[in-house]
Amino acid sequence: MRSSYIHICHILIFFCSPLAIFSQSYQALTGSRFAGSFNMFQNPASSIASKDSIDFYIASLHVNNYTNFIQLGYAPLLRKQPTTTLDFTAGDFARDLMTQLNLSLVSVKYKISPRTAIGFGVNLRSMINVHTSHYNLTDSATDIISFLEQNSGSLPFKGNAASSNWLEYAGNFSHQLIDNRKMMLNAGANLRLNRGILGLVGRIDSLEFQKINIFGNDLYTITNADFIYGYSTTATAWDNTIRFRENLRNVMRETKWGASIDIGAEWLIKNERESDWFYEGLDYNYTWKIGFSMLDLGFARYSYYPGSAKTNGIKDAMTPEILLDKFVGVTDNIGSFNDTVSTVVESFTKLNGNFKIYHPSRLHLNTDRRLTSYLYLNVSGSLPFSVVSRENNYSVNDMAVFSITSRYERERFGLYLPLVYNTKTKLHVGAALRVGPMIIGLNNLNIFNNNSTLQNTSGYVSFLFRIRPREKKPSFDLIKCPKRVL
């Protein structure tokens, strides 16, 4: 049997495992008092604790990627001739792939008064996650039989995968609840309405096989396989023969509305000098800032395409050779693929109606310490949780993230050096720079290491514009007086 069969199996595992989503990722500007509307999606209360009456950012792109499925090769910035590969990672372990793209088209914050701020944003978000139970892959597995032989201890095999892509309209409101000069308490909320552009879901449960010997020959038969695969009707709404505007209109007609909320609070503590009534910036200066928020409590909604299906069990005498012969050449058409699937399983049911993919909810804790006029130290943690049962719903998982970020920050310049730990890529060092309106950052500086791969690198870029409040010049000053006046 050809060695390419084993690669076909890996590709099927890669794309047909059930879906989960990797959520919002770390940004070094978390806790920054000059981030303005850029920060309200990390803590919705932060938009009021800002110096500026108006700030807005445009064309903010944040990309995050993690995978141990495949090796993408090496492409560091300092190497003139990068090495690119596409090899499956050898070893016996569970496989994961998590990607995130967040394109914020615009986000605006307006401070109505020193105690109240509102904001609005439009985001395009895309998330993919694939997870499988452990299985062993070695260079010696040249065909499907040798692959099954070395994985008899990995049963039952399970996997899940998801891709959720949506257009999001967000509104922000933040208000100052308490101000007694020495401390302030701010609270805020985001309401996010979304339209599901593309949803893909799938799951493999209890894939098992057994080995039998007939007349001295070893044969493998698949004894059980339950799986789900589904995608939204928007996936088939695009037609390359018509204009882009008409395609966009057709896709948006098929979208469904979903929603999510964020809630948060920030506690600002001042020293004696900052709490003085005549000290500049009573509503945003602090020595300590402690923030708490709950983010992405909600879902995106889609409608099943009629080709989506759920199966249970498998018919007798289904060997790998028979399955390969049946499926090779029929995967380009969902109708013929479903017809073939129905001939090998015991139960075949088409999925219809609407389905939800729940966002990866998380708790975000943040502590910011002002050391000097321009030097700060920030400590933050992000803990994932689920608002629904993951067994009975399409829900998404997130990575726990802990970071310590030192930063030098002025109104038009900021330098950020985060030390970040997460449960996948472990410990790494990043950097971010803010010069005027431009913000650019990397969560992992391995791109400068010629021995490191780029596959788990993430970064972001944005343009943040700030408009200062107008201050009326007083006609007289009761505080200042000439030095020579007694």
Image (spheres, rainbow, N blue to C red):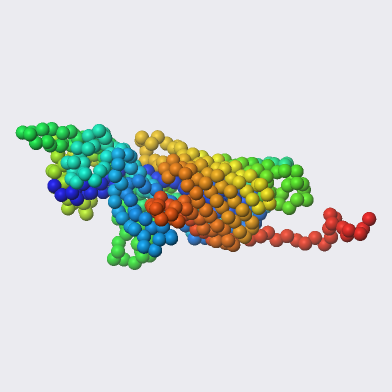
Q: Quadrant of residue 293?
A: top right
How far across and down, in percent of the image, does residue 222 sit?
18, 37
Q: Is residue 341 visible?
A: no
Which residue is more in the foreground, 436 or 303? 436
Which residue is more in the foreground, 431 or 165? 431
Q: Quadrant of residue 92?
A: top left
Horizontal relation, residue 189 to residue 269: left or right: left
In the depicted structure, whether residue 30 falls above or below residue 207: below
How far across and down, in percent of the image, does residue 134 sit?
30, 38
Which residue is more in the foreground, 409 or 184? 409
How far across and down, in percent of the image, does residue 468 sit?
66, 60
Residue at 22% in and 34% down: 152
Residue at 40% in and 50% down: 456
Which residue is more in the foreground, 84 or 227? 84
User: What is the total number of numbered labels drawn onto the structure image?
Assistant: 0
Residue at 30% in and 61% down: 239
Quadrant including the C terminus: bottom right
Residue at 37% in and 55% down: 74
Horizontal relation, residue 479 to residue 439: left or right: right
Q: Is residue 38 visible?
A: yes
In the depicted structure, whether residue 150 falls above or below residue 412: above
Going by the picture, which residue comes out furthest to the left? 215
Going by the picture, which residue comes out furthest to the right? 486
How far across and down, in percent of the image, does residue 35 sit?
58, 53
